[in-house]
Image (tube, helix red, strand yellow):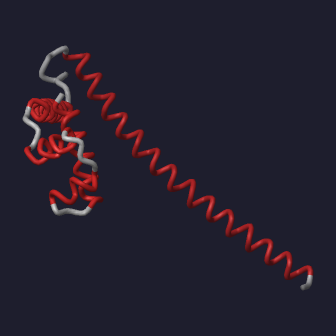
């Protein structure tokens, strides 16, 4: 390669690097401008609340209230599950365990695989812990 070709390749590489840097910075600037515009809107809203001092203009977002309602519903559902009775299949597994049966014996009695019997034993333990 001649020195002229090396200079040309270096110049093209440098120009490509400059172009990629420009595009990256331009994209980053656009993102920052959108964030700033959003923050300006929020600040204007807060300033309006401070200037008017009325409860209507200073109400919380509906999204917060929706999330709060959803959390209350989830809490009620979770607490109602804890007060419910353990399903009968898990009670049956517990009684077999209390009679001294192991996983293989439970599998034979229920005509299921030992792996499935082991899973049922684990689930019955979980169900009894949740019910407490």
Query: Could you tell whether 79 is left or right of 2 in the image?
Result: left
User: Residue 57, image x and y in percent?
Assistant: 16, 23
Please say if 91 is above or below 25. Answer: above
Of residues 91 and 37, the one drawn nearer to the viewer in this rendering = 91
Please say if 31 is above or below 18. Answer: above
Query: Could you tell whether 44 is left or right of 54 in the image?
Result: right
Query: Could you tell whether 113 is left or right of 7 in the image?
Result: left
Please say if 132 is above or below 93. Answer: above
Quadrant (top left/top right/bottom left/bottom right) for the C terminus: top left
Please say if 87 is above or below 57. Answer: below
Query: Could you tell whether 131 is left or right of 38 in the image?
Result: left
**Going 19% across and 35% down the picture, which residue do you hit?**
128
Quadrant (top left/top right/bottom left/bottom right) for the N terminus: bottom right
User: Residue 80, image x and y in percent?
Assistant: 9, 32
User: Residue 83, image x and y in percent?
Assistant: 9, 29
Snapshot quadrant of residue 114 = bottom left
Q: How many marks?
A: 0
Residue 115: tell me if it is visible: yes
Of residues 107 and 13, the one drawn nearer to the viewer in this rendering = 107
**Going 17% across and 24% down the picture, which residue do you hit?**
59
Snapshot quadrant of residue 98 = top left
Of residues 85 and 23, the one drawn nearer to the viewer in this rendering = 85
Residue 62: tell me if it is visible: no
């Amino acid at each position: 390669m001649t020195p002229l070709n090396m200079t040309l390749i270096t110049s093209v590489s440098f120009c490509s690097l400059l172009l990629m840097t420009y595009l990256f910075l331009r994209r980053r600037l656009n993102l920052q401008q959108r964030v700033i515009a959003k923050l300006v809107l929020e600040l204007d809203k807060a300033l309006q609340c401070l200037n008017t001092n009325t409860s209507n203009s200073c109400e919380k977002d509906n999204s917060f209230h929706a999330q709060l309602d959803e959390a209350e519903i989830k809490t009620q559902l979770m607490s109602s599950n804890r007060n419910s009775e353990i399903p009968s299949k898990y009670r049956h597994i517990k009684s077999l365990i209390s009679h001294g049966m192991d996983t293989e014996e439970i599998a034979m009695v229920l005509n299921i695989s030992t792996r499935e019997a082991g899973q049922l034993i684990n689930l019955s333990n979980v169900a009894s812990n949740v019910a407490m």
